Image (cartoon, rainbow, N blue to C red):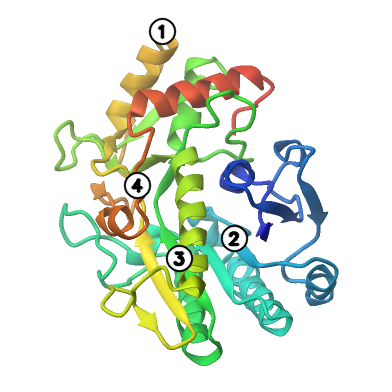
Amino acid sequence: MKTILVPGGAGFIGSHTLRTLKASGYNVIALDNLSNGHRDSIENTVELLEGDIRDRNFLNTVFKTHSIDAVIHFAAFIEAGESVKAPLAFYENNVAGSLTLLNAMKDAGVDKIVFSSTAAVYGQPENNQKLLEGAKKHPINPYGDSKWMVECMLRDGAAAYGLKSIALRYFNAAGSAPDGGIGERHDPETHLIPLVLDAAMGVRPSIKIFGNDYDTPDGTCIRDYIHVCDLADAHVRALDHLFALDTGELDTGNSASDTETNTGFYDAFNLGNGKGFSVRQVIDTVKEVTGTDFTVENAPRRAGDPAFLVADATKARNALNWRPQYSDLADMVRHAYAFRRRHSSFKAA
């Protein structure tokens, strides 16, 4: 049984991926400093190592005392707006932390990593078209820059050291485990679906729509939402893809991989629902699912908000055989609502 180290395993997407890894027959070890993650998101059958990816001595001990076969890396600061206010903190954690992790992996002889990246590496699209992996990389904030820098390290590590890596790019993770046991808990919360649910549950007095005059069918911004369980599935499929390279099961000679050597491999895949949903659609769906009306306020546009951000995930569907199982917005909202009702002690940001 292969053992997978999951930095950031106590976070939203990481904790769901731990479940999927276990169900897929992997032995898993979570690693988290619990600055943003939650210990109770990790089932008691999973070992949790409390520590920081920026601590090289700690990582050396982890790799010496555990037989690690691969890494799935979620340990990052994720708030784009906060990255503008505190860019050095993002570069220290997201970039320097990833560099420390990659060096520890190299010295330990661990050559496979799946990286949780972001479609923010593309920046703002020139028109209302779905983003493809080959689009130019023009991040508009330090968060997107930090993720792209790590992808560059993975690409160059493939050529120089034989590193095998896949980066997964996506926008908005949503939903929760259907059983409501684990879900989204950010502090402060900035993601739209949990914020609208807070309005429906009376945790916050209203929800604001920032701009209702965009060039979209209902005038509000359209974003790509993807169920967290589908994201977890994609990360495990990417891991399987890397292991299949060792067995020769994959013929990558004519593939679309960005960088491939005799021993190293790097590729990037978009993940998305294929259509996107508007802010108004999210609000209306929350009202329908919860059976609750609440105050909606129109507010001015926010600087830098594009009208349309949706990723084309055709490549992941073809190469990883990945298909979202929860592409319906109502399912995402319903599952997130079940979690928030179960954990009703949430406070509004």
Between marks 2 and 4, how big is the CA–CA gap? 34 Å
What type is the residue that disc 4 sits on?
Arg
- Label number found at residue 72: 2
Q: Is residue 47 visible?
A: yes
Where 178 sits versus 31, above or below? above
Disc with the residue nearer the chain's start (2 vs 1):
2
- The residue mark sitting in front, 2 or 1, is 2
Disc with the residue nearer the chain's start (3 vs 2):
2
Between marks 2 and 1, how big is the CA–CA gap? 38 Å
- Specify whether 34 is left or right of 329: right
Where 29 sits versus 250, above or below? above
What type is the residue that disc 2 sits on?
Ile
**Which residue corresponds to mark 1?**
291
- In the image, residue 198 lies at what x, y percent? 52, 23
What type is the residue that disc 3 sits on?
Ala
Where 48 sits versus 209, above or below? below
Mark 2 neighbour density, 10 Å: few (under 14) some (14–19) many (20 or more): many
Residue for point 39% across, 20% down = 286
Who is closer to the viewer here, 60 or 284?
A: 60
- In the image, residue 58 lies at what x, y percent? 83, 70
What quarter of the picture does the C terminus occupy?
top right
Kindly state the secondary structure of the residue where label 1 is placed.
loop
What type is the residue that disc 1 sits on?
Gly
Between marks 3 and 1, how big is the CA–CA gap? 39 Å
Kindly state the secondary structure of the residue where label 2 is placed.
strand
Mark 3 neighbour density, 10 Å: few (under 14) some (14–19) many (20 or more): many
